[in-house]
Structure formats: structure tokens, C-alpha cells
């Protein structure tokens, strides 16, 4: 019941938090939309404004051409110099005058050009056509292109389409993406603006009248990249990118412009990208705007997330508080029950200690007395049977002791009494105690340890138990005539105790479980070895109580090495320890 009440409080709070977060998130989306729309509108308006300015240039230039029948290249250059185009508008590659000619008008036109002193003037590309539109005068402002004089612009479909639209609409038009004549940089993207020029004495009210009165065009070549970059440098937030595509082009030729940050922003999964079809001076373009979330201030973007986390924390706090208040009594009751259970376990532990160990100890004493001859001389068969009974009783006592230690460990009732322990002497004592078992199996034991005694702050009883368990296991799981080794090493701040054998080994897949309670490794010798499955568990717990670690290095059929690390008594210099000579003793 208490959990349901807490869950209800959490659900109500979570619903309110989610509603508030959703409103804030929508606010950020609206802010992003407004900022995005403002930026795109500013860029589009700036581009339209610049093109309007260029139309005014061309409109004035068209007036000049229409009233001067004897216009020369010098007159054209002088007129254009007034606008200081080269410095004020670096995106303009050049301006020019194009004359519209029929095949019959061509000879007189060429004669006029030669009369003006341009003896080398030729129309290209060569060919017999009904209509010509050659570049008559031009001024270049960029070194990227060569002179266009004589180039028949009507021979290029994109340019011709733009010029025809200019006549049809009687206003400035633009081409799609083109390469300017003689452009040495193939990466340049450009377009050309055309404004029609009509003979002043003829009517121009209808499209047909304008075609009949057409004298030619004034033109302006514009570098798309320079134009858009100059507009973006004034209006653009660095977190918005622009790509412009020519909608009337095909294939790869459609890409007319791409800002330097477009790829970086557009590939982001959280970027906002929108496409607009825009008609500029009668030509269709696609504008692709891509904006990063940073278009909105970091403070605005972080508000929803902050609100969400604060709401969640608040929900959890109040739900937890309600749950805590409701369950406080239950926790106290449960704690009381646990204490009662622990008391019962302690009582059972005390009972097991006295009721199980005492009879086994008495049996050990009486059998020992019989073996020592206190009841008279016994036959060989009787002695053999008593030996077996004594050994079985010893194994039973050992198992009882180990189970009692496990119970004490689980109850947290083992207390260490540390003192300065000579590990060198202890290892030799343990080996001496288990010498009979090694002799029975014809095994050899070697010692590898420093000449000087090695000390550690440890509980001598429990550290001895660790060594006894590890050496006993090595003896049991090493075949007859096997080799055992006890090694003692110093390391900076710690001592290493290593018990090594060339026995049956432990496979890699079971090594992770050997230190678990009631676990035994199945192998060819395990059926002949008695054990409770808690020896290595006790060993690991005792080592960790000393602030140390134990690890095993082993392969099946290649033996094992158990490495115990415990804190050293003194901080011997590591360099001295590395150069300290070791003793190598061997026992049969």
C-alpha cells in the first residue's frame, strides 16, 4: 500500500514535470523557428537588394547605349568607371554591351567596328546564323577571365534563354549557373545579368514590338561565391549555412554556391534544414538553409533539460519522502526480526561448536589412547582399523572447524589480532607439518625466499590457516612424484606468498568460481580427495580481511600457482628488494 501511495505521488509530479518540459521545449522550437526565419529572410532580402542595385546600374547603362549611336569602347569604360565597381563590388567580374544583329546587318556592323579602329575584331564561334548577339564593348574587373569581345552570346543556350526572357519581360533577367568566358578556375560559379536595349524611336509596348525594336543588351558577369559570401558576412549568424542550387540545370551543374560551414552543419543529426524555391530575376533557384541548434542561445536551449532534471529530482524526493514516512515503522519491525534471526543463528553456532566438536574431540582422544597402547597390546588388524577411524575423525573435525569459520565470517565475528609475523619461519613450519603427506605421495617441495627474514603485520593464526589450506590443496591435487614450491617475495609495500605445483591445474572457465562457497573443481583427482568446498572461500576472505588479495594462475594439466599479496611490515626499498638474493632449498 505504501508503495502505491509513493508511486501515485511520483506519477502526479512526473506528469506535471513532463507538461512543463513540453511547453519549454515548444518554446525553444519556436525560438529556433523565429531565429531561422529571421536569418533566411535577411539573407534573401540582402540578395534581392544587391540585385536591385545591379539592375539600376544596367538600367543606366542601357540608357547610355540607346542614346549614343556612335558609342565607343572608350566611352563605355569611362561611363563604368564612375561607379568604382572594381573596389566597391568585387563580385562583379565585368560589364559589357551586346549588339543584336540579323545576318543582313552583320557586314555593316563589322565595317563600323573596323572604322572605330578595331581591325582585329571578329565574331566567334564562327558560323553562318540568322541572328547574332556579339559582345561589342566590355570592361573586366577580374583577372579570372579574358576579353569577351566578339563572343556571340546567342550561341550558348543558357545565355540566350535569359536574353530572350529580358526582351519578353522588358526588365533585367539572369542566367543560371554558367562559366564565364575564359575562366581559368573551373570551381568558379557565376551568372550573367542582362538588360535589354531598344531603339529609341520604335514602340516597345508588346513583346512583338520589343523584338522588332531590339538593339541589344547590356550585361554584367557576377561571381556567385563572392556575391553570396559578401552578403553572408554582413547578415549571417555562423550557425546557419547556405547552399544554392540551379533548379533549371541538370546533374552536378546544379550546385551554384555552398558556404564553407554547410557540410559541417548539415550532417549534424540535430541540424534544422529547409529548402526554398526562389525566383530571382525570372530564374528558378533552390536555397537550402541548414542551421545548428546553437542558433538559439545556450541558456534558452538548456531550459527544458534543466526543468526536466529538476522536476525529476523533486518527484523522486517527495515520492521517497512519502515512502520513507509510511515504511518507517515497517523498517523498524523488519530490523527487529533480523536481529532475532541473527541471535538465533548465533545460538545455533554456539550449539554446533559445543555439540558437534565435543563428541568428535572425545572420540579423537580415546582412539589416540588406544593407538598409544593404554588398553594393552593390539593386533595389526585392530591398529589398522583404529588408524582409519582416527583419520576419519580428523577429517570430520577439520570440516566442522571450516564450517564454523564460515559461519563466523558470515556473522562478522572474526576479529584479527595482528602482530609482527616472521613469514619465512611460518612457511617452513607449515611445510614441516605437512611433510608426511608429501612423503606419502613421493612429492618434492622447494623453497624460494630471501636470505633475510620477511615480516608482515598479520594475525598469525589466520595467516597460517591460509598457508595450510593452499599447501594442502597443492599436495592433494598434484600426482605422486610431483613438484611443489613455496615462494616468498618482497615488493614495494607488500609481500607475495606463492604456492606453486605441477598438478592437474584448473581450466580457465572454472577459475572465476573456485573462491566461491561450497565449490569444488572436478578433475581426475577430485574423487580421491575429501573436502567441504569452503577452503578457498575461507582463504580468500581471510586474505581480504588483512587488506590483501589472492589470485590464481593455472592451465589444465600444467599446474597452478596461488599468489597471495598482503601488506609488508616495513617499506623496504624496491630496488634493494629486486637485488636481494633468494635462497633455493629443496625438501624430499
Image (cartoon, rainbow, N blue to C red):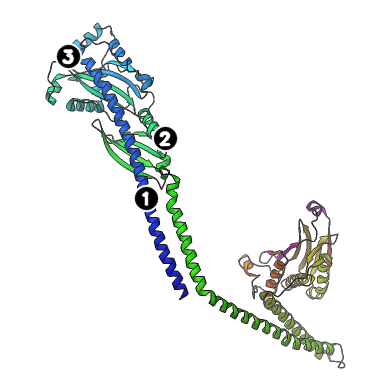
Residue 59 spot, x, y in % from top left: 24, 21
Write down the region rendered in magenta: 551-579
Relative to 392, does residue 228 appear above or below in the rendering? above
Q: Residue beneath label 3, please? A: 105
Q: Are marks 1 and 2 in contact (CB under 8 Å)?
A: no
Give left or right: position of 34 versus 510: left
Counting residues from the start of the chain, the first of labels 3 and 1 encountered is 1
Residue at the disc numbered 2: 260
* Quadrant housing residue 274: top left
Residue located 32% across and 15% down the image: 82
How busy is the neighbourhood of tag 3: few (under 14 within 10 Å), some, or many (20 plus)?
few
Disc 2 element: loop
Label 3, label 1: how far apart the Cα atoms are:
67 Å
Disc 1 from disc 2: Cα separation: 30 Å
Q: Residue at x 65, y 70 (%)?
A: 514
Q: In the rendered structure, which disc, 3 or 2, sits on the residue that comes first in sequence?
A: 3
Q: Which residue is mark 1?
A: 27
Confirm whether the magenta stretch covers residue 223: no
Q: Residues within 10 Å of mark 2 (few under 14, many from 20)?
A: few
Q: Nearer the viewer, residue 340 or 169?
A: 340
Is 564 on the left-hand or right-hand side of 316? right
**Is residue 331 something one can see in this rendering?**
yes
Amino acid at each position: 500500500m505504501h508503495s502505491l501511495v509513493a508511486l501515485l505521488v511520483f506519477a502526479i509530479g512526473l506528469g506535471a514535470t513532463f507538461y512543463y518540459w513540453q511547453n519549454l521545449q515548444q518554446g525553444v522550437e519556436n525560438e529556433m523557428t523565429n531565429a531561422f526565419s529571421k536569418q533566411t529572410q535577411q539573407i534573401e532580402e540582402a540578395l534581392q537588394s544587391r540585385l536591385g542595385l545591379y539592375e539600376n546600374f544596367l538600367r543606366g547603362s542601357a540608357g547610355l547605349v540607346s542614346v549614343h549611336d556612335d558609342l565607343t569602347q572608350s566611352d563605355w569604360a569611362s561611363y563604368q568607371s564612375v561607379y568604382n565597381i572594381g573596389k566597391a563590388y568585387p563580385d562583379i567580374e565585368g560589364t559589357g554591351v551586346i549588339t543584336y544583329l540579323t545576318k543582313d546587318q552583320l557586314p555593316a556592323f563589322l565595317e563600323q567596328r573596323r572604322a572605330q579602329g578595331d581591325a582585329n575584331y571578329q565574331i566567334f564561334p564562327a558560323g553562318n546564323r540568322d541572328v547574332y548577339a556579339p559582345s561589342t564593348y566590355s570592361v573586366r574587373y577580374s583577372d579570372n577571365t579574358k576579353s569577351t569581345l566578339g563572343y556571340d552570346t546567342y550561341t550558348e543556350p543558357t545565355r540566350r534563354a535569359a536574353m530572350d526572357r529580358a526582351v519578353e519581360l522588358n526588365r533585367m533577367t539572369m542566367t543560371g549557373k554558367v562559366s564565364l568566358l575564359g575562366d581559368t578556375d573551373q570551381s568558379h560559379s557565376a551568372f550573367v545579368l542582362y538588360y535589354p536595349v531598344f531603339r529609341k524611336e520604335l514602340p516597345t509596348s508588346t513583346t512583338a514590338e520589343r523584338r522588332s525594336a531590339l538593339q541589344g543588351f547590356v550585361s554584367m558577369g557576377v561571381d556567385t561565391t563572392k556575391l553570396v559570401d559578401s552578403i553572408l558576412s554582413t547578415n549571417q549568424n555562423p550557425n546557419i549555412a547556405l547552399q544554392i542550387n540551379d533548379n533549371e540545370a541538370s546533374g552536378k551543374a546544379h550546385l551554384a554556391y555552398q558556404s564553407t560551414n554547410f557540410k559541417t552543419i548539415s550532417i549534424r543529426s540535430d541540424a534544422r534544414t529547409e529548402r526554398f524555391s526562389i525566383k530571382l530575376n525570372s530564374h528558378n533557384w533552390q536555397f537550402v538553409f541548414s542551421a545548428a541548434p546553437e542558433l538559439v542561445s545556450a541558456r534558452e536551449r538548456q531550459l527544458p533539460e534543466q526543468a526536466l532534471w529538476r522536476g525529476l529530482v523533486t518527484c523522486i524526493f517527495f515520492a521517497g519522502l512519502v515512502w520513507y514516512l509510511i515504511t518507517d515503522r515497517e523498517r523498524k519491525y523488519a530490523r527487529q526480526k533480523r536481529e532475532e534471526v541473527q541471535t538465533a543463528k548465533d545460538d545455533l553456532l554456539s550449539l554446533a561448536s559445543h555439540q558437534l566438536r565435543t563428541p568428535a574431540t572425545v572420540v579423537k582422544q580415546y582412539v589416540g589412547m588406544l593407538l598409544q597402547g593404554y588398553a594393552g597390546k593390539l593386533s595389526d588388524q585392530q591398529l589398522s582399523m583404529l588408524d582409519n577411524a582416527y583419520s576419519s575423525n580428523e577429517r570430520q573435525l577439520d570440516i566442522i572447524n571450516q564450517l564454523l569459520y564460515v559461519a563466523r565470517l558470515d556473522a562478522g565475528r572474526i576479529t584479527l589480532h595482528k602482530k609482527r609475523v616472521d613469514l619465512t619461519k611460518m612457511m617452513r613450519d607449515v611445510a614441516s607439518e605437512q611433510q608426511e603427506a608429501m612423503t606419502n605421495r613421493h612429492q618434492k617441495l622447494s623453497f624460494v625466499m630471501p636470505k633475510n627474514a620477511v615480516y608482515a603485520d598479520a594475525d598469525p593464526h589466520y595467516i597460517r590457516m591460509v598457508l595450510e589450506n593452499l599447501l594442502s590443496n597443492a599436495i592433494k591435487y598434484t600426482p605422486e612424484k610431483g613438484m611443489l614450491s613455496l615462494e616468498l617475495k618482497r615488493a614495494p609495500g607488500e609481500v607475495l606468498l606463492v604456492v606453486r605445483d605441477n598438478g592437474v591445474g584448473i581450466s580457465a572457465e572454472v577459475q572465476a568460481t573456485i573462491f566461491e562457497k561450497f565449490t569444488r573443481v572436478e578433475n581426475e583427482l577430485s574423487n580421491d580427495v575429501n573436502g567441504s568446498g569452503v577452503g578457498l572461500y575461507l582463504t580468500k576472505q581471510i586474505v581480504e580481511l588483512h587488506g590483501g588479495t589472492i589470485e590464481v594462475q593455472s592451465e589444465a594439466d600444467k599446474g597452478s600457482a596461488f599468489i597471495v599479496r598482503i601488506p609488508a611490515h616495513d617499506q623496504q626499498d624496491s630496488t634493494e628488494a629486486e637485488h636481494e638474493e633468494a635462497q633455493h632449498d629443496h625438501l624430499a
